[in-house]
Image: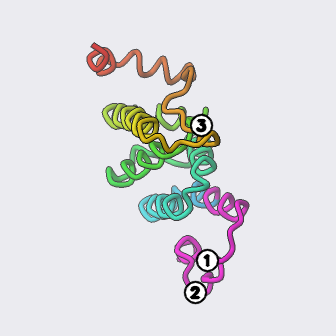
Amino acid sequence: VLLDKIVKQLSPFAFLKGFDDRRLHNALINTLSRIYTREPKIIENLIIQEMKKNGRYTDMYIGDITFSLHRKTLDLTKWSTKNLNSLAEELMKVSHLSWDSEGLLVEIAKIDIDLLFRIIMERIRTDRRRKNSYKISITDRYEPIPYEFRPDFRQYVSNRPEYTQAMA
């Protein structure tokens, strides 16, 4: 209940609406991912709400989620399809796919390889739309796919029959 009020910035935590501090959001996502096993469905929803509410910290959230998957305090296989799709939407928006993002993509692929392909294809479409709009400034940075995927990503995806079918 307490974390729900913090994420939603409800009383007595309404003052957080005017308080934007990366450290606060880092501590919050870290706490949510560490206590996930106590109330998985509630925490899963709070993680997604926190990510959607504070999109400027998506890279940080993805890093923490990926680390939580590594330390086995978070389990994406138990997430609802709706929340997995919300997580995918956040991955479509980030300016580049970091090492952590790629780790998260591997975990998503293990659950739903088609969702992985949708993420990558939407990132490519987004890049094409951006380039065709002629409204890109020099400071804009959007890399649809990494120059080189991390080894575990390459190995997992290239060994999937769906990959060879999609690339044919």
Secondary structure found at label 1: helix
Q: How would you rate the neighbour count of disc 3 (Cα within 10 Å): few for under 14, some for 14-19, many for 20 or more?
A: some
Q: Is tag 1's residue or tag 3's residue first in the polypeptide sequence?
A: 1
- Is 17 in the magenta? yes
Q: Nearer the viewer, residue 11 or 32?
A: 11
- Looking at the picture, which amino acid does disc 2 mark? Ser
First in residue order: circle 2 vs circle 1 = 2
Count of marks, rendered view: 3
The residue at the point 46 percent across, 35 percent down is 131
Above or below residue 102? Residue 73 is below
Q: Residue furthest bottom?
A: 11
Q: Is the residue marked by circle 2 packed among few (<14), some (14-19), or many (20+) residues within 10 Å?
A: few
Q: Quadrant of the C terminus?
A: top left
Residue annotated with mark 2:
11
Q: Label 3's element? A: helix
Q: Residue at x 52, y 64 (%)?
A: 53
Is 61 placed left or right of 111 in the picture?
A: right
> Which quadrant of the figure has residue 41?
bottom left
Query: Does residue 161 lie above or below 83 as drawn?
Result: above
Q: Secondary structure at mark 2?
A: loop
Q: Residue at x 54, y 33 (%)?
A: 143
Residue marked by disc 3: 100
Q: Which residues are magenta?
A: 1-30
User: In the image, what residue type sits under mark 3?
Assistant: Asp
Q: Amino acid at mark 1?
A: Lys
At which x and y percent is residue 61? 59, 51
44 sits left or right of 29 in the view = left
Residue 89 lies within the magenta run: no
Q: Which residue is mark 1?
A: 17
Residue 76 is situated, as x and y percent measured from the top left of the image, at 44, 45
Residue 85, image x and y in percent? Answer: 36, 48
Q: CA distance from mark 2 to mark 3?
A: 34 Å
